[in-house]
């Protein structure tokens, strides 16, 4: 499968390295200083657990031409950036499938303003990281030597089609598991209901991930905010909590919440995947909060804890 990774951010480089080292026909689109650095030294990624480096060189391009053929283009960018490249993707008639990877509240419809429905898939990489000094640090497992986290992908229709199975096979050959979701739109919305309250709690504790784990009051607020976000989603027509572990926010008595969720914020995964990610993504979380507010208004229910944590994210963006 001839593949283009459209964007050389942390996830784009990680994907290109994994697919390239597995011998796939993959190219990475990069520009500016990032392109020059990759031309000079190739992709170098530091394991967030072990500190070990992996390096690979993959073919680089600086544009997608109208007649460039790819079986699959993967776009692992922030939401605003993904929409910005849609006109370029639309101008190409040779690309067969486009997989947008990343946080997404609004769902498929915005892409259909530019692209045919039959080309578009959505997903989420479930790995994270960012720049730590001069090093690109990535965690793709929950713990050292653990199983690699799955990429989640899905069709608008919810069908398990031949093309998603082929993409699953592509990643599996590179040692990356793929979870085929029958409701990727709902999955991405519930991901918001977990990760953005988590980010808000971290910002509230002055960007100190471990400080959240030491603050029982903020931990309880985090759990309540996740419940409130989940209640909004259920109210507007997403009754299935995804993944099932999201039910833990409802099943856990508040008196036990600090004990149950403290390890989440004490983990190295959270420190790298959320902590470094917060530094790298600019205003993406604030943009997601704006999109989610449409669902909150539709649901018509109060979400005081979620609003407070989202307010800390918004305030941070206003300061910067």
Image: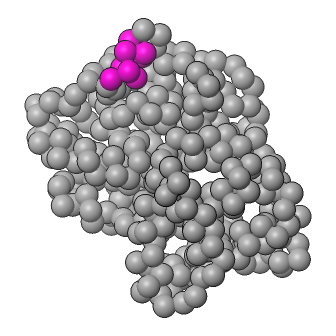
Q: In the image, which residues are magenta?
A: 32-39
Q: Quadrant of the N terminus?
A: top left
Residue 184: give x, y in percent of width and height.
Answer: 44, 62
Q: How is the image coloured?
A: one colour
| Residue beneath the point at 46% across and 53% down | 283
Q: Is residue 278 left or right of residue 110?
A: right
In this view, which residue lies farthest toward the top?
Answer: 40
**Camera sees residue 307:** yes
Residue 157: give x, y in percent of width and height.
Answer: 33, 66
| Residue beneath the point at 49% across and 24% down | 17
Question: Would you place residue 92 above or below residue 65 in this image?
Answer: below
Nearest the viewer among 100 and 267 is 267
Residue 177 part of the magenta segment: no
| Residue beneath the point at 23% across and 33% down | 70
Question: Would you place residue 78 above or below residue 296 in this image?
Answer: above
Question: Would you place residue 299 above or below residue 66 in this image?
Answer: below
Residue 129: give x, y in percent of width and height.
Answer: 59, 38
| Residue beneath the point at 42% across and 86% down | 298
Q: Is residue 298 left or right of residue 14?
A: left
């Amino acid at each position: 499968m001839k593949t283009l990774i459209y964007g050389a951010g942390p996830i784009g480089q990680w994907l290109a390295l994994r697919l390239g080292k597995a011998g796939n026909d993959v190219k990475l689109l990069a520009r500016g200083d990032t392109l020059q650095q990759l031309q000079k030294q190739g992709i170098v990624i530091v394991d967030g657990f072990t500190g070990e480096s992996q390096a690979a060189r993959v073919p680089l391009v600086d544009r997608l031409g109208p007649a460039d053929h790819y079986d699959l283009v993967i776009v692992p960018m922030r939401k605003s950036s993904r929409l910005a490249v849609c006109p370029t993707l639309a101008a190409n008639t040779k690309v067969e499938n486009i997989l947008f990877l990343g946080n997404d509240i609004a769902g498929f419809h915005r892409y259909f303003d530019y692209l045919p429905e039959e080309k578009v898939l959505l997903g989420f990489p479930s790995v994270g990281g960012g720049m730590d000094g001069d090093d690109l640090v990535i965690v793709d497992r929950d713990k050292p030597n653990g199983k690699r986290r799955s990429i989640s992908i899905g069709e608008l229709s919810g069908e398990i089609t031949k093309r998603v199975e082929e993409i699953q096979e592509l990643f599996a050959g590179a040692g990356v598991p793929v979870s085929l979701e029958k409701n990727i739109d709902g999955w991405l919305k519930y991901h918001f209901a977990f990760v953005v309250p988590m980010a808000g709690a971290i910002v509230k504790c002055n960007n100190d991930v471990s400080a959240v784990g030491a603050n029982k009051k903020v931990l309880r607020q985090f759990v309540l905010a996740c419940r409130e976000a989940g209640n909004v989603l259920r109210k507007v027509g997403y009754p299935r909590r995804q993944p099932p572990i999201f039910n833990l926010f409802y099943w856990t008595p508040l008196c036990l919440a600090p004990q149950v969720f403290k390890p989440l914020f004490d983990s190295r995964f959270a420190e790298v995947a959320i902590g470094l990610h917060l530094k790298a993504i600019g205003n993406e979380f604030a943009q997601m909060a704006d999109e989610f507010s449409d669902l909150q208004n539709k649901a018509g229910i109060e979400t005081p804890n979620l609003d407070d944590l989202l307010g800390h994210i918004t305030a941070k963006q206003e300061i910067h």
